[in-house]
Image: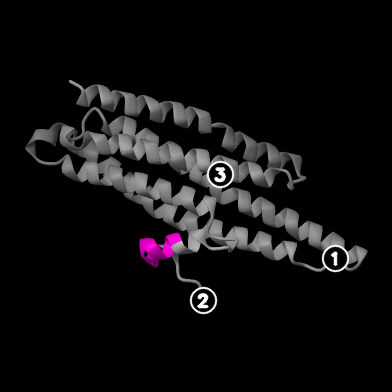
Amino acid sequence: MERTLMRDQAISEFLDALADRVPAPGGGASAALHAAQAGALLAMVARYSDGPKYAEHAESIQRILRAAEDLRAKALQLAEDDASAFGAVADAYKLPKDSDEAKQARSAAIAAALVDAAKPPAEIIDVAGQIVDLAEQLLPVGNRNVVTDIAAATEAARAAATTARVNVEINLGGIKDELTRKALTERADVTDEIARRAELVTARVREEIAK
């Protein structure tokens, strides 16, 4: 039976699938949806930041809006990619190991599947970083009435990055190619900086609403 795309599921259906004893969706898809929500929140703030009052920054706000929507769509696709990749890992572990040749083929299939499984969460970290970039740009010029949603977006982006990082790291142990391991590790290592910048955005928002 063909799986319903997560983008087409009701929230309750997705949560039921997330809670079920199945390989996917799991933490990687959850990370991607954190990122998608972050993009959606920034798009909402940008849409509220229009009219004569914001005319001076209209071009920047429209650019941020387009980028946020693009990242939202990319994050949703990464949720699907992660679920498919993790399903392939589960399938690789089910391959026969009743001979030396079968064991070698199984090991190779698992290693390849783990590389593929690490790629979507690594891309989610990239997306989260770009969302924090946009939040930093939108905060000084966006509508003050919805400034807390910028903080909400950066916190969702932080959750996306930190969740995605552990989903990269869990796959590293089975990846033997050193160059691949190094590249994936470097992509995961930017997470702390993303989290630090997100925290600063939230702190600035809290300062703003405390005035």
| Left or right: residue 135 compared with residue 30 | left
Mark 2 vs 1, N-terminal side: 2
Q: Position of residue 83 (x, y in %)?
A: 55, 60
**In which quadrant of the rendered view does residue 58 lie?**
top left
Which residue is at 88% across, 68% downward? 98
Which residue is at 70% across, 40% downward? 181
In three-dimensional space, the C-alpha distance between marks 3 and 1, rounded to whole angstroms, equals 30 Å
Q: Which residue is mark 3?
A: 122
Amino acid under label 2?
Answer: Glu
Q: Is residue 32 magenta?
A: no
Amino acid under label 1?
Answer: Lys
| Left or right: residue 190 compared with residue 90 | left
SS of the residue at dot 3? helix
Which residue is at 80% across, 57% downward? 107
In magenta, the rendered stretch is: 7-15
| Left or right: residue 1 compared with residue 11 | right
Q: Position of residue 200 (x, y in %)?
A: 37, 24
SS of the residue at dot 1? loop
Q: Which residue is mark 1?
A: 97
Which mark is drawn over residue 6?
none
By secondary structure, the bulk of the magenta-drawn segment is best described as helix
Q: Residue furthest bottom?
A: 1
Amino acid under label 3?
Answer: Ala
| Left or right: residue 64 compared with residue 156 | left
| Foreground disc of the pair 3, 1 | 1
Q: Which residue is mark 2?
A: 2
**Which of 72/153 is in front?**
153
